[in-house]
Amino acid sequence: MPALELDHGTLSYEVFGAAENPGLFLIHGLHGDSESVRPIAERLAKRFHVIAPDMLGHGESERLEEFTLDDQAQALTQLMFEYGYRDTNIVGYSMGSYIAARAAALAPEQLERLVLVAPKPAGTTSSTATAAENAGLDPQTASADDVMAALQQAIWSESTDEDRRREIMSTVNEAENLSKDERERIEESVQGFDLREYLPSITARTLVLSGADDGLNPPKVGREVAELIPHAEFRVYERSGHMLPYEETDRFVDDVTEFITAGRR
């Protein structure tokens, strides 16, 4: 994988599609990496030059002892500047949406279109901890199996059958190589984040997508994000939960492609 030495550590990334196409930075979710979004990247690469980083602490990027959401956003903006686009696009999923939104406020001059998928404006804990707490578990003492079972209950739409769920998870988890300590450091990096003061300063044209059955970041928090960003468009996918890009991939790819290419020079 190509890699870039940045202020906050080494960032590795994958590239998909022709370099002459419009640039699109695709940012994965918590505990994911560029491999976990490969099925989406390969579809989007038919129209875009897709750069999919392993964010700090994930995949092949540097496993730092401590980092924050702001560190992640600054790393993303440095990667954007490295590619030198006059204007570009970001699609961020779950944790990636928090990073994308913060980066959009940090580097408005670089960004034309922004797509935030399964976002929320602020959070006291990680989504994994939220799922455990919602199930009545203590995230610190619950077994990994119990926490995973709670997470599985929170992320899916009833419209997504068991076979499709297994297929999606086998793809998403294919490159999972994080230790327990590394996973905990990643979750600590998003504890207590708050984007509400930054969202009104975003100037990129923005699309916010939420899954109707998302038990982690439900549509009401997605709508709050959209209402804080000037002129943002908000859509709910009725047959999706938190795994929206994987549950309704055809619609997602079509919507992102149409949104980013509409009215481009």
Image: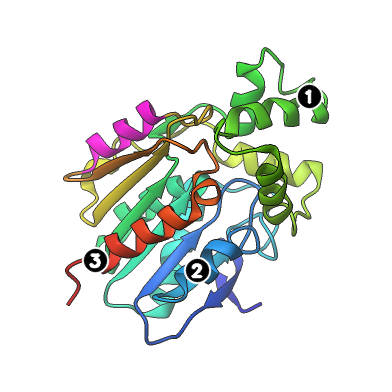
Q: Crowding near pointer 3: few (<14 within 10 Å), some, many (20+)?
A: few
Residue drawn at 42 percent across, 32 percent down: 122
Q: On the picture, is 70 further left or further right than 85?
A: right
Quote the CA–CA distance across marks 2 and 3: 27 Å
Q: Which residue is mark 1?
A: 146
Answer with the quarter of the image where residue 132 lies.
top right
The x and y percentages for residue 238 are 41, 35
Q: Which residue is mark 3?
A: 109
Question: Which numbered disc covers residue 43?
Answer: 2
Quote the CA–CA distance across marks 3 and 1: 45 Å
The numbered mark, 2 or 1, whose residue comes first in the sequence reads: 2
- Element type where label 1 sits in the image: helix
For residue 190: magenta? no
Region of the chain picked out in magenta, as a range = 219-229
The total of numbered circles placed on residues is 3
What is the magenta segment's predominant secondary structure? helix
Residue type highlighted by circle 1: Asp
